[in-house]
Image (cartoon, rainbow, N blue to C red):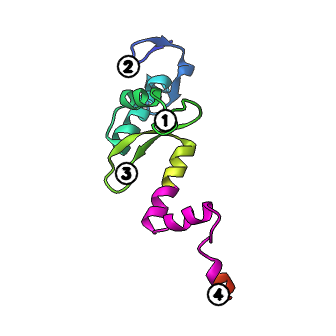
Amino acid sequence: MKACSRCKQSKPLTEFWKDRSKPDGRQHACKECERSRKRNDHYKERYGISEATAKDMKEAGCRICGTHEGTLCIDHDHETGEVRGVLCHSCNLSLGHYERYIRINLMDSVNNYLKGGSDGRTKSAESGSL
């Protein structure tokens, strides 16, 4: 048994990662505390928020469809880094495509296609340049 330096709980040695540089061959903090620290560091470094804030955001569900199912992603503006909220995997992918279509001015072509019109390539295909 060994006491974790973070949570102070006594745990079996198997609950500590191996570390040959330590006298007992194990890290000072237990695996659970190390995982929590790494998650917190990830959220701080990547998004500027704490793990607790990310957890609260995820508990609210996807900001677009409202689901709590599956993987929930922290959504952020890729230009400013500002966190916008949490999205499910499907909404996150859809938003990425939507932003791309707006950026390259394809929304009119997409809307026309969905209404049964030209797909934006018809004229090129007819002239043989496709």
- Give the residue drawn at x 38%, y 27%: 52
Where 61 sits versus 128, above or below?
Answer: above
Q: Is residue 23 visible?
A: no
The residue wearing badge 3 is: 77
Asked if the stretch drawn in magenta spans residue 100, the answer is yes
> Are dots 4 and 3 in contact, CB under 8 Å?
no
The residue wearing badge 4 is: 129
First of labels 2, 4 by sequence position: 2
> Are dots 3 and 2 in contact, CB under 8 Å?
no
- Residue 62's mark? 1
Q: CA distance from mark 4 to mark 3?
A: 37 Å
The residue wearing badge 2 is: 5
What's under tag 3, amino acid-wise?
Answer: Asp
First of labels 3, 2 by sequence position: 2
In the picture provided, is 6 more to the left or to the right than 104?
A: left
Q: Give, as a single range, the part of the protein colored magenta.
A: 97-123
Q: CA distance from mark 3 to mark 2?
A: 37 Å
For discs 3 and 1, the disc positioned in front in the rendered view:
1
Image x and y of residue 68, in percent: 54, 29
Image x and y of residue 18, in percent: 52, 30
